[in-house]
Image: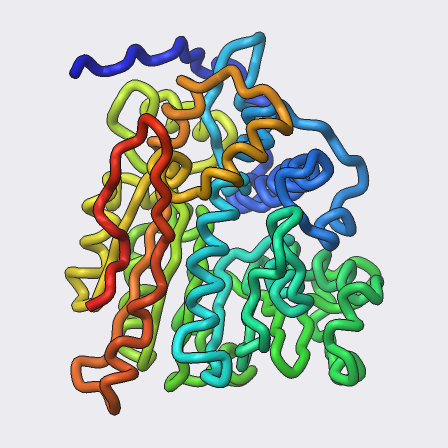
Amino acid sequence: MASRPIPPLRPLRRPLDPPASQDDAIRATNDDATVSKLSAVNLGYLHDPFVHFFVRQPVRRSPLINRGRIPSLLTSLGHLIIPFSAHWSYVRNAALNQLITKFLAAGGTERKKQIVSLGCGFDTRYFLFKSRSPQIPNQAATAPSAFPIHKYFEIDFPELTANKSSVLRAHREFTELWGSEATNVMNVGASHSPGGGGTELYAEDYVLLAGDLRQWESKVVPRLFELGLDMNLPTLFISECVLIYLDPVISDAIIRWATDNLHFPAFVLYEQILPGDSFGEVMIRNLQARNIELKGIQACPTLESQRRRFLDRGWTFAEAVDIDTVHDRMLARGEMARISRLEMLDELEEWRLLAQHYCIVWAYRVPPVSSSSEDSHLFDAVRFEEHEHEGAGRVPHMFPRG
């Protein structure tokens, strides 16, 4: 079958006022991602009663942006530009929440788990799960009937955690979810905090931690243990376009640490892939014009290399799919019909091209000698649900049992 023609791509010739440093550029992607998510919430793609607290001036995005949550930099003079940061997409959100919800339910809700969100930004997932708020409109709450979280850790630059801490403390919609725990919330480290309010928050099952992932073993890990990380509990790491910003030596060290130190580690990642084709090359150049470098993309440029980064370390299972496959095969027919009625999406070829350059990876490891057969199959049911759609062939079951 002949390959589809690539839509016209226009490289970004003029830098759009790049931030002073790469760290600033990466932090800036959080703001645009949050605005884009609120746009999709306001139009009915997603349900999130918390995200608006982090946005001062809502902006309506185009249908392509709302459905794929691609930042506004994608369009310039009517031509497609390339996505450049960790922006939520409707498809991405639905897919990730499938996996995370099933992780929380694995082994029953009485089995406590941990989540470590790397580069959390203004993510509200903890509050959505804690409130059992449905993340897809008109659906029942998708979180387990109980909240099986021992600790939910969020980690990011202190400049971001200071702002997030300030918002969380200012609104009862957040603090009431801690109930009596709210009185135990503490703030420390005012160096980056607006008004000196602190850069961190602690509650019984929630920790907002200021940290630089480049100092993972020397500084971040000791703080995690200090704040209650339990090596023996099933622990899910979430990385949404985060590890890819790090030198591969550092991202590999984080995965290696999880492999060597945690009893039941799991990872869910969302990252860019395919830097070597025409689309990918323009993507890289446009990112560089924004002073953003995907330092890890050459180390894991394909779906297979994303799988191998875990399997080669002895992980029990790893799978990777691109967003195009998730969109076509893993969303329910009724849900696809619902979002198609919200806005007209004409840029189907552009959507597919973009979606083929982003992937979701799910991996887990159980001990070679588990304490019980139940433990050895703890994550078997954590997989995408596959749905057949007219005109779309079937794909092998992801994350199958046994």
Please give the name of the residue rendered at 56% of the width and 57% of the height, measured from the top-left corner: 120
**Height in image: 311 above or below 7?**
below
Q: How many marks?
A: 0
Left or right? Give the position of 136 relative to 112: right
Q: Position of residue 24 (x, y in %)?
A: 58, 43
Q: Quadrant of residue 3?
A: top left
Q: Position of residue 311 (x, y in %)?
A: 18, 60
- Tell me, yes or no, if residue 294 can be seen here: no
Please give the name of the residue rendered at 37% of the width and 47% of the height, measured from the top-left corner: 360
- Tell me, yes or no, if residue 351 can be seen here: yes
The colour scheme is rainbow
Please give the name of the residue rendered at 62% of the width and 74% of the height, measured from the top-left corner: 206
**Height in image: 166 above or below 201?**
above
The quadrant of the picture occupied by the N terminus is top left
**Height in image: 328 above or below 247?**
above
Q: Quadrant of residue 344?
A: top right
Please give the name of the residue rendered at 37% of the width and 43% of the height, measured from the top-left corner: 387
**Height in image: 319 above or below 294?**
below
Q: Along the line of sight, which residue is nearer the eye, 51 or 385?
A: 385
Left or right? Give the position of 90 relative to 195: left
Q: Residue furthest bottom?
A: 371
Q: Along the line of sight, which residue is nearer the eye, 184 or 376?
A: 376
The quadrant of the picture occupied by the C terminus is bottom left
Left or right? Give the position of 138 relative to 108: right
Q: Position of residue 343 (x, y in %)?
A: 62, 24
Q: Along the line of sight, which residue is nearer the eye, 21 or 157?
A: 157
Q: Position of residue 226 (x, y in %)?
A: 53, 85
Q: Along the line of sight, which residue is nearer the eye, 16 or 270?
A: 270
